[in-house]
Image (spheres, rainbow, N blue to C red):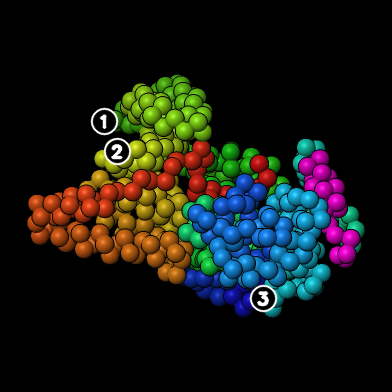
């Protein structure tokens, strides 16, 4: 691993620094997981080998728990599943994802030792488990997992002390990385990547992490000088400074002292009022509007959970009519409502309105997120597709091009979602050329094409955001 070096980061403990200069989009290192498992809730919908979402999966005939795309994936995953398969059969059921991950890690360490590859910078023994920092309820959950693990762990496998098991359990708890599906749109599992555990947090980081073809890639977001610390964001920057600090303290056991937290950078935008002709609403008006939006968000999430999307639209529309004149276009609650309205309206196939809300969301994101931000890139992609669906080819193409430029940095050219974007960009560029030559012919051809091949319904909106908001997976 010649591209990085371990060093003592002031106030943070160990960290990673650049051993050479990097530029935006450079892959600093890639790393395969020590072990990874599918979430309990998705065990029957995600392949346990390649982590792809498939309509029909083949179930393991022995344990009846693991699912695979086909025999190729089953054979590829057998080395990891072999001992797990026997253990599940003997135990009578599959334990939770944390226990399954713990067992897979220990089987691999027993077989290969504490260093499983030439590029591994740190052993699990050297990683922090933060058990002494855990709250009482977390310690209870940890003890339950350890008790269940001991029942699950085969007597024929190598036996380990409680201290060893507890340590690895703690490492998983604070360093388990969310593994996404093949397109990077949804977290579908959890894995452990030892080298990634060394990258410290910064709310305005110089690196991002993406899962690409089964390996995580640490990618530079901009120019990084030799000797500069490599940082990633553990939590979403869209949170206020105080909320980010609370999340980092409770979930990762440290106090964030980054520039953006210390100086509360952009907090005024995230909770600001709308300025019209130099006049802003009073602090009290903004405070009341913010409290009202918070109540509406809870009602909106409840309606989404129940699948009542027309009720979601009604709730959001009433809120938008009342709050848009008061709250800034960067207010994080208003951005959430616009995002939901865009998603639900697209699902209901009201594409013109969906496009309008998507555009507002992207414009707000552009003022808050850094230029090369995966969250901004994904939002621009969604907005581009929505504008295309609405027949607004010029805006749609522009948004897709913007998204493509960002994701070339954050995801790279070989990532499936970047390839999808490249195909979209080519298509919208061709359509835009046709549109500029003759609008009437373009719309006639588009209408005929849509009649022959009706627009497919958008994916059903979920009760929670599908984008991976946090870098590391935490037990809910």
SS type, badge 2: loop
| Viewer-side label of 1, 2 | 2
Residue 209 can be seen, yes or no: no
Q: x, y (%) of residue 312?
A: 42, 30
Specify the quadrant that holds the N terminus: bottom right
Q: x, y percentage for residue 318?
A: 36, 24
- Give the residue at mark 1: 277
- Residue 350's tag is 2
Residue 3 seen by the camera = yes
Tag nearer the camera, 3 or 1: 3
For image coordinates 34% across by 65% down, the residue present is 422
Circle nearer the N terminus (1, 2): 1
- Location of mark 3 (residue): 119
Say if the magenta span includes residue 141.
yes
Residue at 80%, 38% (x, y): give it. 136
Q: Which residue is pictured at 79% across the width and 47% down the height?
A: 145
Tag on residue 444?
Answer: none
């Amino acid at each position: 691993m010649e591209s990085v070096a371990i060093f003592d980061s002031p106030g943070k403990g160990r960290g990673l620094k650049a051993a050479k200069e990097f530029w935006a989009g450079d892959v600093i290192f890639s790393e395969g997981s020590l072990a990874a498992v599918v979430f309990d809730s998705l065990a029957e919908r995600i392949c346990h080998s390649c982590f792809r979402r498939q309509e029909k999966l083949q179930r393991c005939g022995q344990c009846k728990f693991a699912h695979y795309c086909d025999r190729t994936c089953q054979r590829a995953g057998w080395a990891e599943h072999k001992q797990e398969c026997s253990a599940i059969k003997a135990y009578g059921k599959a334990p939770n994802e944390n226990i399954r991950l713990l067992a897979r890690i220990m089987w691999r360490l027993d077989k290969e030792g504490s260093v499983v590859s030439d590029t591994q910078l740190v052993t699990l023994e050297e990683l922090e488990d933060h058990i002494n920092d855990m709250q009482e309820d977390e310690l209870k959950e940890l003890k339950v997992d350890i008790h269940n693990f001991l029942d699950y762990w085969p007597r024929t496998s190598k036996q380990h002390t409680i201290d060893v098991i507890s340590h690895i359990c703690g490492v998983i708890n604070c360093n388990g990385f969310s593994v996404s599906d093949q397109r990077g749109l949804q977290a579908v599992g959890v894995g452990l990547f030892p080298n990634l555990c060394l990258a410290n947090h910064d709310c305005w980081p110089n690196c991002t992490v993406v899962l690409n073809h089964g390996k995580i890639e640490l990618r530079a977001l901009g120019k990084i000088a030799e000797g500069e610390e490599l940082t990633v964001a553990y939590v979403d920057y869209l949170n206020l400074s105080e909320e980010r600090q609370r999340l980092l303290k409770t979930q990762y056991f440290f106090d964030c002292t980054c520039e953006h937290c210390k100086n509360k950078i952009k907090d005024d935008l995230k909770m600001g009022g709308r300025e019209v002709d130099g006049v802003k609403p009073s602090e009290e008006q903004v405070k009341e509007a913010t409290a009202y939006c918070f109540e509406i968000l809870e009602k909106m999430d409840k309606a989404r959970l129940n699948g009542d999307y027309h009720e979601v639209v009604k709730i959001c529309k009433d809120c938008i009519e009342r709050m848009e004149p008061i709250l800034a276009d960067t207010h994080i609650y208003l951005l959430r409502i616009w995002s939901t309205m865009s998603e639900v309206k697209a699902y209901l196939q009201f594409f013109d309105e969906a496009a309008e809300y998507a555009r507002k969301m992207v414009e707000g994101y552009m003022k808050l997120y850094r230029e090369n931000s995966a969250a901004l890139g994904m939002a621009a992609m969604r907005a581009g597709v929505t504008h295309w669906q609405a027949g607004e080819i010029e805006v749609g193409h522009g948004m897709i091009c913007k998204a493509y430029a960002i994701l070339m940095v954050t995801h790279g050219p070989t990532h499936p979602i970047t390839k999808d974007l490249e195909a979209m960009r080519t298509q919208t560029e061709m359509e835009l050329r046709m549109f500029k030559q003759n609008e009437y012919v373009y719309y006639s051809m588009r209408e005929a094409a849509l009649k022959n091949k009706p627009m497919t319904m958008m994916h059903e909106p979920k009760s929670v955001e599908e984008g991976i908001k946090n870098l590391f997976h935490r037990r809910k």
